[in-house]
Image: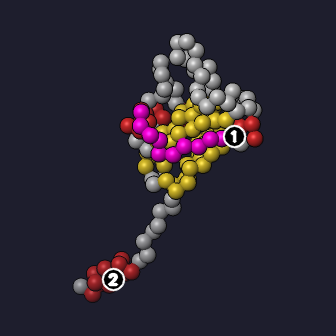
Amino acid sequence: MKILALAAVMALAAPAVAQAPTAVTFRFEIGQRAGKIMMSLHGSEASYRSGPPTRQAVIDVAAGQTSATFNGLPAGDYAMKAFHDVNGNGKLDTNPFGIPTEPYAFSNNAAGSFGPASWDRARFAASGAVTQAIRLR
């Protein structure tokens, strides 16, 4: 009985293990050294499909930047969308059929079929420090 009581007291006295805040970094393989990469990070499928992003970032490629980090995120599932605004007009340019004419990418280097990559393909679990190398298409 004394051993059980001692074990219970020790368990209560043990410091809680603090989980480090989540930091997600995306490093882009850049083809053209002009314009900016516009990115959005989404913490749910609804947000990824059509809602507001959890966070956004702009990478100034012309100034030599090639990565962005989102710090202080809660652990969970995320997905990222990005495009390289080469001509600096602030939007993803497309041809008359709606096909992008500027480079774009999704987390996990996921590819879509006749549209953006699905949440299931782009989704990744984040806890602690996470880094992804992303190829723009």
The amino acid marked with disc number 1 is Asp
Instruction: Give the answer, above or below, for where 86 lies relative to 80.
Output: above
Visible in this render: residue 18? yes
Question: Residue at 58% of width from left, 15% of height from top?
Answer: 95
Residue ranking furthest to the bottom: 2
Is 67 displayed left or right of 9 in the figure?
right
Residue 59 image point, x, y percent: 66, 41
**Residue that badge 2 annotates:** 9
User: In the rendering, at what x and y percent does residue 130 appear?
Assistant: 55, 49
Instruction: Say whether residue 136 is visible.
Output: no
Badge 1 element? strand
Mark 1 vs 2: CB contact within 8 A: no
Q: Bounds of the magenta span?
A: 50-59
Q: Residue 48 appears in which quarter of the rendering?
A: top left
Please name the residue shown 46% across and 32% down the image.
121
| Disc sitting over residue 120 in the figure | none
Residue under pointer 1: 60
Residue toward you, 74 or 7 = 74
Residue occupying the point 52% across, 56% down = 72
Residue 99 lies in the magenta stretch: no
| Residue situated furthest top in the rendering | 96
Residue 29 sits in which quadrant?
top right
Type of amino acid at the residue the image marks with label 2: Val
The residue that appears at 33% across and 82% down in the rendered structure is 9
Does the segment drawn in magenta span residue 52?
yes
Report the Cα–Cα distance between label 1 and label 2.
55 Å
Q: Quadrant of the N terminus?
A: bottom left
